[in-house]
Structures are given as structure tokens and as C-alpha cells.
Amino acid sequence: MPMDYFLALDAGTTSSRSILFDSKGDIVAIDQIEFNQIFPQKGWVEHNPEEIWETQLRTIKRVIQKANIKPEQIVSIGITNQRETTVLWDRDSGNPVYNAIVWQCRRTTPLCQKIKQENYDKIIFQKTGLVVDPYFSATKIKWIIDNVDKAKKLLKEKKLCFGTIDSWLLYKLTGGQSHKTDHSNASRTMLFNIETCKWDNELINYFELDPSILPEAIDSNSYFGKLDKSLIGVEIPITGILGDQQAALFGQTCFSECEAKMTYGTGGFILFNIGKEIYHSKNKLLTTIAWTINGDTFRALEGSIFIAGAAIQWLRDNLQIIPNSPSSELAANAVPDNGGIYFVPAFTGLGAPYWDPEAKGAIFGITRDTTKEHIVRAALEGIVFSTKDVVEAIEKDSNKKLISLKVDGGAAKNNFLLHFLADILNVEIIRPKITETTALGAALISALGCGYFKSFDELKKIYKVEKIFKPNMNEEKRNNLYYHWKKAIDKIRNF
């Protein structure tokens, strides 16, 4: 019998990827193409939506060739994407009216400040679980409509479409037949009510938008449409969509309350499953929809660490004290402890739970005995302490304890980092065999959506653990190390 396959489209911030999984959850083939980053002026970040679409389509064709399979063997397609990035396009022609405004773009800072001055940020937080920030989609949509004449014209004619990257790709994949998104992506726009799971008319009116531009927001494991036959010669159902961080949570099979995942990339994102309840954070975390499946909506608390793997890149590229990122593990293990060094990697301010954009990075405790190995070790420890800060905030908000933490991303390959993380958090750290958990989550949600798998229990059988790191540090030492980290944080915030 021919094998069944599931295609995950992973539309990232710097590249388009297609990953083909078999029915056992193993990777069969990967293809990736980078696309251009556009910086029109300081603080502005854009992408060409057509380039995103073209590179994504090329990876689909190439991954099928690499796997040497027939397209007919692909059971379903799942999409995962960089969240918040905003595209507006002509409903008839499918042509974008402007470049995609990327989640990193800060051009709408003045509008966000105005919202806060009007005290409307409290209403937005209550309805959406989000803090008012240029990060999210609503102010990006308004900027394009206010500044692009074609967008204004199409809006009057009811021919303007908005979408995050999942919606944009879905529209193109289906030949313009489907303008939809899922609840996880909708919850990142600042226009979606996370209690009612509907677009919020009050917010739409506040931003002077028209509901006709919005995609239909449906369950994450829905039938979203089918691949246009003209693209690769067959029609394939698209039956799952999740934003990238939610997809990683799903790919890590964190289906139950108090389960969490941490993705260590350039920065770090932790999502903590809070089940069907809604907690509005008192500790500057975001509440987001994890997924809606068969009408049941699960939510998550989310915390962002601005600098994680980027700290190791800085040691490699700027200080040049390590030749490559993997060598940081050897350097950290070459010394018995941090030698009193505390490294706070606040290169771009502090993220959750501090949200202090003015904070600067610092290295404390340097003496004549300090070596480069101490500094490398302290940098890795700083990533762990930053994670501890967010976990503490999550536990205060939810009044629940972290059970374990599943990790993925580039820095999750570092054994020293994960051993120290287990010690400081005092929980088991689980590293999966397949670290492409974002793409795996997209594949699994589509497999659930098309009925290939029937339950979470079936999906859990696919998940494979590569290694478990168990805590092995006494409480006094743990508390002492974290106490000095907190002192370092206080210093940089009052510098």
C-alpha cells in the first residue's frame, strides 16, 4: 500500500518552507527558500506578499520532487505562519495594494500612543487579551487604508481583503475561492474577541474599518478550501491552520491545562495552556487563543523573551569568543560555575514580564579571574533566568504550577542550557525527537481536520521524546542564583 503524507506549509518571517510528514509523524523531506526583508526607513519592516506566495509555491513543488512521491499521496495540507503580519489585497484580482507590514514593524507607534492616551487600551486588553502595541495587526490595517489610495478606493467598493499570512496564502492556494483564517491567528489582530470568538464590532468601528475586509474566522481544524488543481495537478484539502507559536504548542502535544512549550530561536516564546478559561494577565503577559477544535476553544498565556539565541550569536559575531553556536555548550561546561558573572541580554530592552524598552544589556561581576568561558556560561544562564521570570508570571496569573516544559528551536539543542533550565525551574524539560514542532503542529492539525486522526490520544502516540532533563539542584543554590539575577535586573532598569 502507498504511504499517506501530510504537507505542512511553514510561512516564516525570513523564509518559506514546505515539510512533508508521513503518517507516523516523521519528516520525509524539507524545502526552504528565503525571501527579501524590506526596510523602507528606520523601524519599518515589510515583505513583498507576491514573493512570499511565489517562494511558498516553489517549495511545495520542490518538496514533492525531493520526496519522490505522487501529489495524490498527500492527504491534507496544514498552514502555519508568522503571526500579525498584515496584507491587504484586491478581492477580484488578488493583487496586493501594498507590501505586507511585518509584525516587527514599529511605524504605528504614534497611533498606539494615541490609543493609550484615550484610555482605550484597557478595553482592547479586556476584549482581546492583548496589550496595545504596533506588533499586532489592527493598527497596520489602518495605516495602509489611511496612506494607500488604492486601499481607500477598494474599501469603498467593498473589494478590499485583509489577511494575516495564512489568509493570504490560503486565498492564493485556492485560486481566490477562500478568504478565511482560524481563531489562533484572528486572536492576534486586536480585532477579535477571545471570549465570544468573533470579530468585535466595537473594535472594528473604533479603528474605522469595515467588517467586509475581514476573513471568515473558523475552527483551526476546519475545511478551509482545496488546493487549486492548476498548481500541481491535483486538488488537496486544506484542513488546518495555526499561528506559528500555537502550532508549536500543538506539535508538542500540549493539549492539557498547565502543559507548556518554549521555543528558543532569536528570542524565546513560551505558551502555557490554560484550557477553556480566560485569564487576563496581571503580570504583563498576553492571553491568546491556542486553538479552537470542533467548537471547543483552548486559550494560552504567552510570554516573549526578546533575546535568546541572539545572545549566543552576539558572543560569536561581536565578541568572537566562540567560533560557532554549538561550541557555547563546551565553553559553559569548561568551568564549574559562572564565577559570579551575571549576563543580562537586554540588547533590545526587556520583554515579558517587564516590558521595559529602555533597559540595556549588561555583564555584572567581572574580576581578574573572569574568563571567556564564564561569560559564555553566564549568557546561557541569562536565557534560563529570563525564562524563569516569565514562568513565575504565568504561575502567578493562573494560580497553577508548571507540570513540565517541552522545548524546541535552535538553542534547544544545547544540553547545558536544558540541564540548567531543569535545575532553575525545578521541573522536567522535554526535548522531542522532531524539533520541527511548528511544522509538525500544522501537519497534525490538518490530519485531525480531514479525519485521518480522530483524537488527541492518537496524536500523542506520534510524539517522540529524544531526551528528558531532570532537576538536580538543591533549593538553596537555586534561590541564591535567581536572587542575584533579580539584583542584576534591578540594576539595568535603574541605570
Image (spheres, helix red, strand yellow):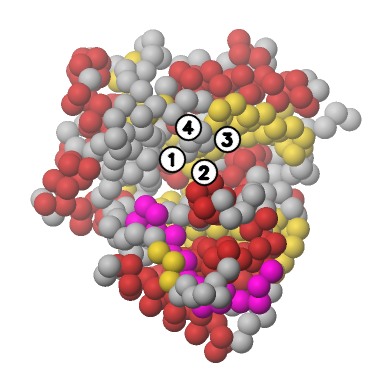
Residue annotated with mark 3: 10
Q: Nearer the viewer, residue 487 or 230?
A: 487
Q: Amino acid at mark 1?
A: Arg
Residue 377 drawn above or below residue 254 = below
User: Is residue 307 visible from the viewing direction of this image?
Assistant: yes
Distance from disc 2 to disc 4, alpha carbons, whole Å, reads 10 Å
Helix, strand or loop under label 3: strand
Q: Is residue 260 inside the magenta stretch?
A: no
Residue 325 drawn above or below residue 69 = below
Q: Amino acid at mark 4?
A: Asp
Give whichever of discs 3 and 2 has the lower sequence position: 3
Helix, strand or loop under label 1: loop
| Dominant SS in magenta | loop
| Magenta residues (range) | 334-349
Identify the residue shown where x is 32% and y is 20%.
Answer: 98
Give whichever of discs 1 and 2 has the lower sequence position: 1
Q: Which mark is residue 83?
A: 1
